[in-house]
Each structure stands twice: as structure tokens, then as C-alpha cells.
């Protein structure tokens, strides 16, 4: 999967998740904001989180690398992010209720697989709809929503909504 972004903001003192302010000792330098919400390329004081799905879409780097990058990258620079990372929950009967279940139910309903209420509860009706969807898309019909099922649901959702956003 590939995502294309453009750097729209350089800010060495950006507010970040949790309301922390950055400093040179704990740099959280937001240098990338997208049109559909703020994502950042930023430094971290927890280098063990680099390369992991430790945030809500941001790219973490060593603080010294972000400081170097800050002076090198002009506004308007296009950034290409390549790779697949699964950051969702695995959904199955009995998993705690959630917005992710509601989203799956809504997509399945739009695609004609689910006719129940959109409740956020992964119940037998949801599992059955997932199994039919999986069967039709060549996925092992186990009724569990994992990375492969999520990816196919997203593609169907994007097609149904004529969405071209990453």
C-alpha cells in the first residue's frame, strides 16, 4: 500500500497528542499535516516505538534525525509512505463493543451482507455476514475480522463511496 502526503507545516513547538509541547530535549516536531487530519513526522523520547504501530498514524524518528530533516525539507515536499501495517483489533464474537465493529457493520450493510442494527456489538449476525463476505472475496470464511478481511472491507467501502483518499 502507498500513501502520498505533502508537507504543509513546519513547527518545532507543535502541540501533540496528550497536549504535550515539544522541546529540543523531547522533540515532537510536526512537519507533516494532511488534508484529512494531522499526521506527523516527529521525534520521540521513546526510540523503542520507532517502526511500530505506536501512534495513530504518525511516523516516529530519532530526535536528532528530525532536527536534521527540519532544515532539509521545504514546505510542499511530497512524501511517499510505503508499506502495510495492521493497527486494528481482531474482531470476533465476544470481543468488547466498539466503533470498529460499527464500521464493519456499516460497510457490510452498504455491500448487502448485513441487515441488522449497527450496534457495535460483534454478534452471531455480524459473524455470519462477515463469513458470507469472506466467502465471496476468497478469504477463509472463519467469521473473524483480521488484517486480510479489514483490507478487503476497506476496498469495498472505498469503491462504494467512490473514495480515492488513502
Image (tube, rainbow, N blue to C red):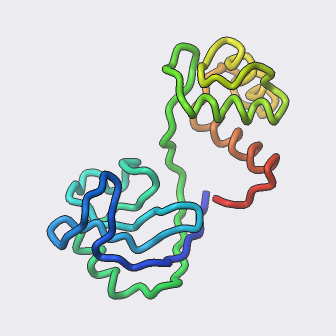
Which of the two residues, 44 or 131, is positioned nearer the viewer here? 44
Residue drawn at 54 percent across, 76 percent down: 6
Which of the two residues, 140 or 23, is positioned nearer the viewer here? 23
In the image: residue 110, left or right of residue 166: right
Residue drawn at 42 percent across, 59 percent down: 58
Specify the quadrant of the image occupied by residue 126. top right
User: Looking at the rendering, in which quadrant would you find the C terminus?
Assistant: bottom right
Which of the two residues, 87 or 18, is positioned nearer the viewer here? 18
- The percent position of residue 50, horizontal first and vertical second, equals 32, 56
Residue drawn at 19 percent across, 65 percent down: 26
- The percent position of residue 33, horizontal first and vertical second, equals 49, 69
Residue found at the very far left of the displayed protein: 25
Residue found at the very far front of the displayed protein: 19
| As drawn, 59 above or below 29 | above
Specify the quadrant of the image occupied by residue 28. bottom left
Residue drawn at 64 percent across, 22 percent down: 119
Amino acid at each position: 500500500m502507498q500513501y502520498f502526503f505533502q508537507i504543509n507545516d513546519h513547527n518545532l513547538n507543535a502541540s501533540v497528542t496528550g497536549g504535550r509541547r515539544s522541546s529540543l530535549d523531547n522533540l515532537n516536531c510536526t512537519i507533516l499535516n494532511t488534508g484529512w487530519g494531522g499526521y506527523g513526522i516527529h521525534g520521540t523520547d521513546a526510540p523503542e516505538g520507532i517502526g511500530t504501530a505506536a501512534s495513530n498514524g504518525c511516523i516516529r524518528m530519532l530526535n536528532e534525525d528530525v532536527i536534521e530533516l527540519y532544515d532539509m525539507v521545504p514546505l510542499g515536499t511530497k512524501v511517499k509512505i510505503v508499506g502495510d501495517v495492521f493497527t486494528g483489533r481482531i474482531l470476533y464474537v465476544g470481543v468488547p463493543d466498539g466503533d470498529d465493529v460499527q464500521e464493519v457493520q456499516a460497510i457490510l450493510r452498504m455491500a448487502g451482507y448485513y441487515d441488522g442494527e449497527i450496534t457495535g456489538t460483534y454478534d452471531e449476525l455480524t459473524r455470519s455476514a462477515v463469513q458470507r463476505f469472506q466467502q465471496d472475496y476468497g478469504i477463509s470464511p472463519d467469521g473473524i475480522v483480521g488484517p486480510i478481511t479489514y483490507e478487503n472491507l476497506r476496498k469495498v467501502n472505498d469503491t462504494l463511496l467512490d473514495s480515492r483518499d488513502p
